[in-house]
Image (cartoon, rainbow, N blue to C red):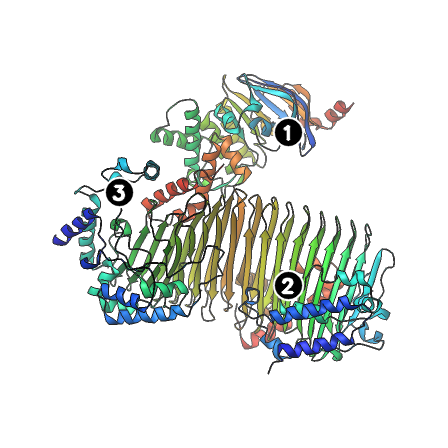
């Protein structure tokens, strides 16, 4: 119970971030990045030396790399020396009650059906001592511990389970993988570690939702999920509520490892600040997410609903190494205003009978630009590999853009690969049909768009799916008609 | 309840309707027959408010209002229902939710509260049974992957649920086998009432074996060239449209 | 050691001096500008997105620096065996890239054919200025080098409202004289308002083993309401390198339909760009490719809708055998304001061998909303059930496979329309023999 008390105190103080050592709470490094900064991050977090060495190696490699320029996105150059690579959790101004919160934000919360307590937490209002999430989180922790599931901050894991982390970290996304992965590997702030032992079906959905304040782990988040043979876990990331964040650049790395017969389901709802009406500000989200289906019959499923950020650059991928392994990618990406998204997946088939499914639904509205970029590679040894890709884009308004860039590489004559893509606006026939049945144009459009996304939403855990649907409606408000 | 006067309309500059007059009163069932390309479907679409048609003259009064000034959904909310020749597929949109949304939109327009789930479910199941629509189809996406017959039954189900004041059935019989035709006709007959007007647009007489119209009109070259009782339909069956066209041309 | 860029440059500079000179300095200036562009660009490599899957290493190693020598004598007897029974209104014969006036016949009314070599000799500035009007100086090193060094080709002008009711054939024959050399030539096809024509281009080699680099740049411009049916069959020697750049520009209500077959060569790439210049035009591009041991076939399409109300359709199908490789890259672009665009692209591949590889990359880039665009690609095998079905009807397995392969390509083959072309394609495919050799060392399916 003592831990719970301190957690609660921290929550109340609004400075809580799991795994951070108390004395550095007030520290914020001056902007800039060099070896000393990398060393200082590691030192502040009390990391083992091997972690520091890994960070340094990544940093040195990062120095030799250039920012990728192939994606269909445009943004002013990022000055990596203007970023502060370590800061204590942001202190939002304390508010007395919800009355002091911007009514526009409250209205959004209302539409999304977010409970009053959560609204307070999200808006940075001092919460009551009996804050539901805390007790819920505690109960959850106990149940997880009983099952043997580790679910903690990665900095905590580095302290408590260093060998486990060492074994898997960077084994899926090596620091040399790409520019942003290298940067993350050098300076990652914190993140989540999940370990599900052999044969264990995780007794509940794991969610950053239950770590609302902890979710502010900053711009360089690192997540590692390991599912041992025969285990199962479903992980939810993000939140439908619009999250304000002062950090413009986000460069997260997520690694998933699924051993024999293991199943990992990773769901994301991303609704970071997209910038203002003129396209100023907003989060640049450069994420590297990759799952390794290491064992036979392993299964990794990515589902994402991307509605936020000014720039999104992410390709949650699967390396299908195991025989009969399965990779899935379900995505809804919405860009409106001046948002740009270049997102998709890679399915690398190595194991025999490996199968993958890709369903991507892009919605572009106003001046939004949305690109699907995907790779399906069937290696020479991947006998009987199968892929099916369905990739649809919906256009709303004549100033938006939708692009589709699939790459299909096949080196095995037993493979079956199918890719289909369409781009169009909401059909006049459908609109007329709905309106003839009495629906207003706006309701009709929203109904048709929800239908368009259905295949993806139904992959989300139930309560997330409902939220996602509401989120979509709120996101497209004003963009339709 | 519906009065069409000298309606002239064109598509892409091509004149399709050239002065149509038609009067429908509550309780009446009117059949509009005619050869392909005579303008039957155009008339149905214009009444429902479909884009893409230019009305150059004439007027349409519906329940005392200028129908052509109303938005598509306003017409629907005022009880005008169009059962379509080619019902549209709505992928991902659940058939039952769609039906409920539509019902509630109508109720809202009339200032009524939303229908409660229980009575909605009861009604929809009962009516689906009546039109012999497989209950499984209620849980699927609207019309997506439905057979031709299933789509038409679904249209009739929607009509039964929405209880329109004026129902227009556009070639509802096209592509149906005899069993489906009978089921659809039964569904229509069940809805006949003193308050409700109906316009049945069809190319063939055979639908009229099951739905007995009060009046039959023949539309040809954009005009109603002949009106009469049920026997007119039988005459057409026997003699085709040729003689009427000749007469009209003469 | 591969030749260096300056080896190529030196050769081009020498070559330019040997070309007919009366065309005046301005032509030389442009060739020099192209040469400079070549020097800037160099040859493409796989870091360039357009060449991601196609290595030019093997081609460069061959060192095709020098162009083929000019033909002097009458070679009538040599072309006879390459002729097909086509009810053509005209035939233009090119041997080793050089236009053979004595072997060529064409209608005099409404059709003007000028060899580029003759245009150079006569200083026909109007014709020469049109060369490069669609391609520019070149988007890659190869194209720039072609403009710098092309030595012949033809300009075909069809007058307004001339409607040819039978095809014109362009026969491109390569002989022993091309061995080890490159054939940089250009064709320019200008169709007047309301004109209609059909062009059949065939690329054949005298010797099945000759090794040379055939590089064609073709520019096709269709005025309002003009219509061109363009058929191209590449059946060159199995050692040949073939590169074709086609640039198509369509004015209002023009219709272009092209169908391409790539079957010969060890390295063959066709790059087609279509530009809609005005609304209401239509472009159809279809093709087939068949690759076997040591062959690469590459098709790149770039169909650009920048004006409203145009439509395009592309269907490419390929069969891969032995260690064959295929690359398909099909881009559809719809620019801002190009409303009511419709574009559909499809690519299907049959992969019949363990050593084969296919890379396919359809792309959509859409900046307007009132559009209907789609693309689809597939990679698969012959259907076991279909093979079983045919066998149960008495065919042996090889026959069954051959039949299914033919069936797979049939929709494209049919687009070649003329019986003589269809037969020639089918003979060349010769599925029965090939599947035999294939099943002798491997059997997959």
Taking the image as shown, residue B235 lies to the left or right of residue A309, namely right
Q: Is residue B80 above or below residue C355?
A: above
Where disc 2 sits, the SS reads: strand
Q: Residue at x 39, y 23 (%)?
A: B112
Where disc 3 sits, the SS reads: helix
Residue C297 image point, x, y percent: 61, 68
Residue B9 image point, x, y percent: 66, 27
Q: Is residue A280 visible?
A: yes
| Discs 1, 2 touching: Cβ within 8 Å | no
Q: Is residue B36 above or below residue C100?
A: above
Q: Badge 1 is on which residue?
A: B54
Q: Badge 3 is on which residue?
A: A118
Q: Badge 2 is on which residue?
A: C271
Q: Quadrant of residue C138?
A: bottom right
- Location of the N terminus of chain C by quadrant is bottom right
Residue A360 image point, x, y percent: 45, 52
In which chain is the residue bearing label 2?
A: C
Q: Are marks 2 and 3 on the same chain?
A: no
Q: Are marks 1 and 2 on the same chain?
A: no
Q: Residue at x 72, y 73 (%)?
A: C183
Taking the image as shown, residue A411 lies to the left or right of residue C115, namely left
Closer-to-camera residue (B159/A328) = A328
In which chain is the residue bearing label 3?
A: A
Residue C394 image point, x, y percent: 61, 65
Q: How many marks?
A: 3
Q: Is residue C431 visible?
A: no
């Amino acid at each position: 119970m003592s831990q719970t008390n301190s957690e609660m105190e921290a929550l109340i103080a609004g400075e809580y971030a799991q795994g951070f050592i108390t004395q550095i709470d007030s520290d914020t490094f001056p902007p800039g990045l060099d070896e000393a900064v990398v060393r200082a991050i590691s030192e502040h977090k009390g990391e083992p030396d091997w972690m520091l060495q890994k960070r340094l190696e990544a940093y040195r490699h990062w120095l030799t790399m250039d920012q990728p320029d192939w994606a269909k996105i445009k943004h002013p150059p990022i000055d990596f020396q203007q970023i502060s690579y370590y800061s204590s959790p942001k202190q939002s101004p304390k508010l007395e009650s919800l009355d002091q919160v911007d009514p526009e934000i409250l209205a959004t919360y209302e539409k999304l059906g977010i409970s009053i307590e959560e609204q307070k937490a999200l808006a940075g209002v001092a919460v009551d001592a009996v804050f539901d999430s805390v007790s819920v989180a505690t109960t959850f922790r106990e149940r997880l511990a009983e099952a043997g599931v580790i679910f903690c901050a990665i900095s905590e894991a580095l302290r408590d389970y260093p060998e486990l982390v060492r074994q898997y970290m960077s084994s899926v996304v090596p620091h040399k993988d790409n520019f942003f992965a290298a940067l993350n590997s050098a300076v990652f702030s914190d993140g989540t570690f999940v370990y599900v032992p052999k044969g264990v079906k995780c007794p509940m959905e794991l969610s950053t939702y239950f770590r609302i304040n902890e979710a502010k782990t900053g711009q360089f988040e690192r997540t590692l999920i390991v599912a041992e043979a025969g285990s199962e876990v479903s992980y939810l990331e993000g939140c439908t509520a619009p999250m304000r964040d002062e950090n413009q650049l986000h460069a997260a790395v997520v690694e998933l490892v699924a051993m024999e017969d293991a199943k990992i389901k990773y769901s994301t709802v991303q609704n970071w600040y997209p910038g203002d009406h003129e396209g100023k500000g907003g989060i640049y989200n450069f994420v590297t997410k990759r799952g390794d289906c290491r064992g036979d019959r392993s299964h990794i499923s990515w589902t994402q609903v991307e509605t936020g950020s000014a720039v999104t650059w992410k390709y949650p991928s699967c390396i299908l190494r195991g025989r009969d392994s399965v990779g899935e990618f379900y995505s809804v990406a919405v860009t409106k205003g001046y948002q740009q998204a270049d997102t998709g997946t890679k399915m690398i088939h190595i194991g025999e009978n490996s199968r993958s499914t890709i369903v991507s639904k892009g919605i572009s509205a106003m001046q939004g630009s949305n690109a699907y970029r995907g790779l399906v590679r069937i290696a020479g040894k991947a006998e009987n590999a199968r892929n099916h890709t369905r990739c649809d884009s919906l256009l709303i308004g004549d100033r938006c853009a939708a692009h589709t860039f699939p790459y299909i590489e096949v080196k095995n004559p037993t493979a079956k690969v199918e890719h289909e893509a369409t781009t169009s606006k909401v059909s006049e026939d459908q609109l007329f049909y709905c309106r003839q049945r009495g629906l207003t144009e706006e309701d009709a459009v929203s109904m048709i768009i929800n239908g368009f996304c259905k295949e993806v939403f139904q992959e989300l855990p139930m309560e997330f799916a409902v939220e996602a649907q509401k989120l979509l409606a709120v996101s497209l408000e004003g963009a339709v008609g | 309840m519906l009065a069409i006067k000298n309606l002239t309309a064109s598509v892409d500059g091509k004149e399709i309707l050239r002065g149509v007059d038609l009067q429908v009163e509550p309780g009446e069932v009117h059949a509009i027959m005619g050869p392909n390309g005579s303008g039957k479907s155009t008339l149905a679409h214009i009444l429902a408010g479909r884009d893409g048609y230019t009305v150059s003259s004439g007027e349409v009064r519906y329940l005392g209002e200028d129908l052509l000034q109303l938005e598509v959904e306003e017409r629907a909310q005022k009880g005008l229902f169009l059962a379509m020749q080619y019902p549209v597929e709505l992928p991902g949109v659940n058939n039952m939710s769609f039906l409920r949304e539509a019902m509630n939109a109508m109720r809202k327009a009339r200032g009524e509260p939303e229908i409660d789930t229980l009575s909605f479910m009861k009604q929809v199941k009962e009516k689906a049974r009546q039109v012999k629509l497989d209950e499984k189809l209620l849980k699927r996406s609207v019309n997506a992957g439905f057979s031709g017959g299933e789509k038409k039954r679904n249209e009739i189900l929607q009509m039964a649920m929405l209880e329109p004041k004026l129902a227009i059935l556009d070639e509802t019989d096209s592509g149906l086998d005899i069993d489906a035709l009978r089921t659809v006709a039964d569904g229509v007959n069940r809805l006949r009432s003193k308050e409700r007007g109906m316009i049945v647009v069809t190319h063939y007489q055979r639908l009229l074996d099951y739905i007995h119209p009060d009046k039959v009109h023949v539309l040809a070259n954009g005009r109603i060239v002949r009106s009469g009782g049920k026997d007119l339909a039988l005459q057409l069956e026997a003699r085709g449209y040729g003689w009427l066209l000749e007469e009209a041309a003469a | 050691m591969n030749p260096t860029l300056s080896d190529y440059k030196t050769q081009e500079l020498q070559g330019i001096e040997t070309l007919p000179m009366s065309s005046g300095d301005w032509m030389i200036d442009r060739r020099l500008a192209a040469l400079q562009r070549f020097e800037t660009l160099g040859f493409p490599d796989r870091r360039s997105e357009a060449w991601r899957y196609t290595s030019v290493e093997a081609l460069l190693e061959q060192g095709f620096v020098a162009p083929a020598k000019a033909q002097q004598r009458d070679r009538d007897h040599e072309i006879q065996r390459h002729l097909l029974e086509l009810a053509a209104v005209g035939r233009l014969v090119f041997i080793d890239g050089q236009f053979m006036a004595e072997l060529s016949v064409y209608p005099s009314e409404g059709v003007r054919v000028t060899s580029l070599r003759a245009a150079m000799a006569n200083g026909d500035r109007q014709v020469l200025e049109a060369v490069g009007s669609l391609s520019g100086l070149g988007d890659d090193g190869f194209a720039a080098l072609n403009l710098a060094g092309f030595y012949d080709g033809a300009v075909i002008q069809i007058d307004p409202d001339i409607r040819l009711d039978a095809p014109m054939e362009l026969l491109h024959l390569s002989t022993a004289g091309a061995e080890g050399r490159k054939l940089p030539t250009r064709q320019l096809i200008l169709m007047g308002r309301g004109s209609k024509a059909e062009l059949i281009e065939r690329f054949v080699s005298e010797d099945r083993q000759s090794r040379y680099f055939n590089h064609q740049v073709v520019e096709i411009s269709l005025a309002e309401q003009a219509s061109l049916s363009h058929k191209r069959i590449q059946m060159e020697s199995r050692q040949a390198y073939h590169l074709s750049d086609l640039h198509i520009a369509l004015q209002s209500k023009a219709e272009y339909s092209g169908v391409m077959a790539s079957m010969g060569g060890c390295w063959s790439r066709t790059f087609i760009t279509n530009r809609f210049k005005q609304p209401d035009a239509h472009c159809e591009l279809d093709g087939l490719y068949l690759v076997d041991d040591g062959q690469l076939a590459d098709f790149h399409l770039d169909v650009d809708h920048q004006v409203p109300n145009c439509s395009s359709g592309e269907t490419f199908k390929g069969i891969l055998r032995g260690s064959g490789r295929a690359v398909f890259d099909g881009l559809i672009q719809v620019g801002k304001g190009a409303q009511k665009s419709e574009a559909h692209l499809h690519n299907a591949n049959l992969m019949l061998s363990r050593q084969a590889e296919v890379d396919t990359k359809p792309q959509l880039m859409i900046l307007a909303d009132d559009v209907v665009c789609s693309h689809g690609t597939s990679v698969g095998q012959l259907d076991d059930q279909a093979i079983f079905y045919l066998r149960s009807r008495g065919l042996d397995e090889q026959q069954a496979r051959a039949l299914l392969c033919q069936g797979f390509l049939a929709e494209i083959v049919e687009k070649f329309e003329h019986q003589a072309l269809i037969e020639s394609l089918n003979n060349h495919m010769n599925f029965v023999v090939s599947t035999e050799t294939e099943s002798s060392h491997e059997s997959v399916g």
